[in-house]
Amino acid sequence: MKKKIPVLFTIIILILTVMILDALLVPKTEDGIRQAKCFYEQPENSIDVAFMGSSHIHCNINPYELYEQFGIASYDFSAAEQPLWITYYYVLELLKYQHPKVIVLDMYAPARFRDDYQYRWLNDNLAGLKLSKNKLDILEVAAEPDRRGDYFPAITFYHTRYKEIGMADIKALFESSADKEKYKGYTPYENVSPQERPALDMDSIRALTSKSEEYLNKIIELTKSEGIELYLLATPYPVKPEEQASYNYISELADKAGIIFDNTNLKYDSIGIDFDEDFSDFSHLNVKGSHKFTEYIGKELLIHYDLPDRRGMEGWESWENR
């Protein structure tokens, strides 16, 4: 037994060292990594509305404003360019800790991207998640076999970051659970980038890829089996003709499934979108635009669903602290 103690001590030190290095070296992005890491700090079963999908979620929808204006307790559990086959496992991960009344699912990525493997933002979709079967399943469905070793274990992806370590990395090591809990996923963009208002073709149809449609159906079936309302969404941006054709197809799918698909690109004027002032780039709203859109989506949610007003209730204080 005495001989085993030093070995056990060495193993514990090694594990702690790897954990500290992992926390220090992981990129501190708000493109999905921070959204996922702070999701685990939210009080259990406190999220009534989970916003899921691509960066159109965490750049365009502000949960603090939803809470302040409407008392809606929500979270942006999203990541950059997230395809539906990753979102499906995000929903499974969500359900381990939360049981929201509504999941709002952004349809930008399946409307825009056509490839079964999308590597540009894969690490941002993976690195913030806890190690679990869901994370391994994401790796299997989102990366070809010869590429999986590039992303798992995560430290193989970012171990060279030691050259870039700064105060933000050190500060993150000592961030409290309370600080992580009050973060709700929102990533504000302050800059202004004027965009051209598009003309929308409501007649063209472009089907989703077979993989996207398969996982959309999986999400529809899963939410129905869990008694969760599913609200499909396209946020406002200068939509391209081929993307609008995909949204037309999604509208047909939603009608057949008996669920809402809200393509807000058909509502620029009623939302008050100003193409000269409300965008940060070709795809995302800035803070001013997100304020308008958040107000819109809050009103829509209360029209369609019976959501509780959590303002002033015990257990929801973190939504009050930005």
Image (spheres, helix red, strand yellow):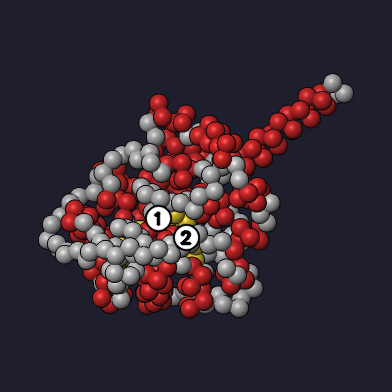
173 left or right, relative to 196? right
Q: Amino acid at mark 2?
A: Thr
245 left or right, relative to 236? left
Q: Position of residue 199 (x, y in %)?
A: 16, 64
The quadrant in which residue 252 appears is bottom left
Q: Position of residue 41 (x, y in %)?
A: 61, 56
x 87%, y 23%: residue = 2
The residue where tag 2 is placed is: 187
Q: Position of residue 1 (x, y in %)?
A: 85, 24
The number of numbered badges drawn on the structure is: 2
Crowding at mark 1 (Cα within 10 Å: few <14, some 14-19, many 20+): many
Marks 2/1: CA–CA distance: 9 Å
Dot placed on the residue nearer the N-terminal end, 2 or 1:
1
- Any part of residue 48 in sight: no
x 74%, y 33%: residue = 12
Q: Amino acid at mark 1?
A: Ser
The reply to whether discs 2 and 1 touch (Cβ–Cβ < 8 Å) is yes
As displayed, is residue 154 above or below residue 218? above
Q: Residue furthest left?
A: 203
The residue where tag 1 is placed is: 55
